[in-house]
Image (spheres, grey):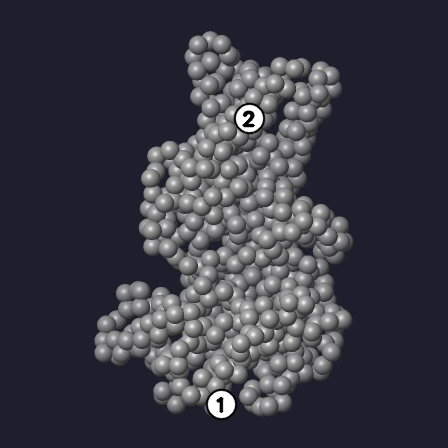
Amino acid sequence: METTAAAAAATTTTVNGGLHSVEVNPLQLILNRAFALIYLFAILALFYHHTLKLLNSTNSFITFSISISILISDLILAFMWSTIQSFRMYPLTRKEYPEKIKNFSNNNFPALDIFICTADPYKEPPLNVVNTALSVLAYDYCPIENVSVYISDDGGSELTLFAFMEAAKFAVYWLPFCRENKIVERCPDAYFSSNYTENSETQKIKLMYESMKTRIENVIERGKVDDDYINEEDRQTFSIYWTAGFTHHNHPSVIQVLLENGKDKDKTGHGMPNLIYLSREKSKSSPHYFKAGALNALLRVSGIMTNAPIVLTLDCDMYSNDPSTPQRALCYFLDQKLWPTLAYVQFPQRFHGLNEADIYASEIKGLFHSNPVGMDGLRGPNYVGTGCFFRRRAFFGSPSSFEQPKIPELFPDHVVNKPIQAQEILQRAHYVASCNYENESNWGSKMGFRYGSLVEDYYTGYRLQCEGWKSVFCNPKRPAFLGDVPISLYDVVSQNKRWSVGLLEVAFSKYSPLTFGVRSMGLVMAHCYAHYAFWPIWSIPITLYAFIPQLTLLNGVTIFPKVSDPWFFLYAFLFLGAYGQDCLVFISFQGTFKRWWNDQRIWMIRGLSSFLFGIIEYSTKHLGIATQGFNVTSKVVDNEQGKRYHQGIFEFGVVSPMFITLATTSIINLVAFLTSIAQIYKGDQNLDGLFIQMFIAGFVVINCLPIYEAMVLRGDKGRMPTRVTIFSTFLAGSLYMAFAFLLRSV
């Protein structure tokens, strides 16, 4: 995880408590800071050049507007570059020694509550959620009765509850099978898709899994739980809750204990973890705060029922890939030097099923891998919504100031001494899961997961660190968790648009990293969070650079220095330096050049689609215009889409305004590039003066190759819709004529 030059340097390792070590590379620090200093001087020289150009410009409004637009673009690029450098000021790597945990804990690990959230059985198939839950139910934890798995079903679906009733029955056989055979892949679907050992026991377990899978899928296909799938006791459960007036948006709280430690045993007589289904109360007259509200309901219900000091949050499609993962987290939580201010241990998001080139850059290597390493040398990585072990106390005020809940049972140090199905416990759990419980309370503001942004993960981690908490990045060689990736471009950009809206909600709030963050955590750490908060403003320079140089090129207007001008080399250095450093960092984190190329391509695509439309949606929302709000990303895999994805073919098969901007950009850049080549060939234009504009247009054209293919060469269902192509062609022509008219009117 180091560049070639840095790897050759000596490293310093510090061991803390024998459970983990910290490694810092001095040469890497020197090289990063030296490059940042040199590049900073180049940026200052660029703005000096801009100033000279503006002072010597004509009084023409259009030429002045072009110069100002390029200046604004460069200012934003410079700001975002400065925030990126914050991640590279003090990177460090860690290593854990989980084999030593038993010496510290005497085989009695602290209790662990695991939260898994789902919201829609048709976009998030219950079978996938079941696989995630089974993978963590089977953790190697001592004793296993200290583990409790909570399923939050925010869709209030009887289909999801049925799936987990089936999972509880299968777990009686699956958990001892994994333990006795020392299975590492404890997600059943992943295990039976691997090269597992064939024997009679394995075949028996596989038949059980296939039977469970068939029953769940049949119920999902029918859309209801028929009587022939459940016994009399389960039928009463469904009839109590799912009455005629029950809807996804208006229903009472549902809490169902599916497995109870101390009561339920596996087939070998060993105890089992708790498995609890929760659907919090919903009412159309009460705010629900999306996933953050669901997590806070889980935090309270689990506090009443088990109140474990450690909490793991997981996405419904992010299954455990290593049964020893909790021990790795405990390597930090059991360190008495870290414990007083340690809020959470974050594992990176990793994914299975990525195609070779990762065409949609789903790894998001900066967010999930390289940037957390840089933040770990400061106050710790940001929370990314899944694969994160929290200390429950961190949700109740700063390290030095405790925020008291309304009822003492929710205090982090409260000891639950009654069975989870005791009437008093269940009544209290239903009470804290009610939609009115948070009224006139500090939940979402000073306690729990924080409200105020669609990206509750980023915002919660940020606020916790502003309060004085720290975090740790744990990145073992074997991925701790593996998740699904979106296999269509529309799902990718839609998800990123939602993130963009949520990030802007933080950027322009009273808790903005540039103001509140700087005061609370210092300039460098605040700039790390500012990089994400202002992520969507990448769209401004990307959009301007995708249109202005090309439209001026079509009209023979020079806006950049000539190749013969010394200032040309400044532009070349700035481009090569930024892209070169980004490429080196990407490859140093076990990346490939092909994947890096797709990563920067998707950065451009996001800038012209999700970032741009995220800014628009954020702006309209604050003007009081209705917006879409929170949308669940579909986890359903279409066979044809899946086939095209693994062939490395982009998927455009829906009509979306975000695809119109992409298609319009590709058309204008292609026409500008080909026209300029033709004009130079005929001698009508001079390459010396237009080289930078031609280079930008050509660079965009190369990045847009999948778009051209989807517009012209493909006949499958994933091609660019004809309506989008026609409208984009018309829009590109209109932009050209409007720009030409403005230039000729000067």
Q: Residue at x 56, y 49 (%)?
A: 497
Question: Percent position (x, y) of residue 462?
Answer: 66, 58
Q: Which residue is mark 1?
A: 262
The answer to whether residue 277 of the structure is visible from this angle is yes
578 left or right of 182? right
- How many marks can you see? 2
Could you say whether the residue bearing mark 2 is in a helix, strand or loop?
Answer: helix
Question: Percent position (x, y) of residue 558?
Answer: 58, 17
**From this viewpoint, which residue is outermost toward the front?**
244
Question: Percent position (x, y) of residue 427?
Answer: 62, 86
Q: Residue at x 59, y 44 (%)?
A: 613
| Callout 2 crowding tier (Cα within 10 Å): few <14, some 14–19, many ≥20 | few
CA gap between label 2 and label 1 equals 72 Å
Relative to 661, say whether 152 is above or below: below
Q: Residue at x 51, y 73 (%)?
A: 151
Could you say whether the residue bearing mark 1 is in a helix, strand or loop?
Answer: loop
Q: Amino acid at mark 2?
A: Ser
Earlier sequence position, callout 2 versus callout 1: 1
The answer to whether residue 16 of the structure is visible from this angle is no
Question: Percent position (x, y) of residue 509?
Answer: 73, 52
**Quadrant of res 379:** bottom right
Q: Which residue is mark 2?
A: 734
**Quadrant of res 597:** top left
**Quadrant of res 44:** top right
Q: Residue at x 60, y 60 (%)?
A: 457
Depth check, front residue: 21 or 499: 499
Depth check, front residue: 368 or 444: 444
Relative to 179, say whether 284 is above or below: above
Nearest to viewer (mark 2 / mark 1):
2
215 left or right of 443? left
Report the disc number at residue 327: none
Q: Amino acid at mark 1?
A: Gly
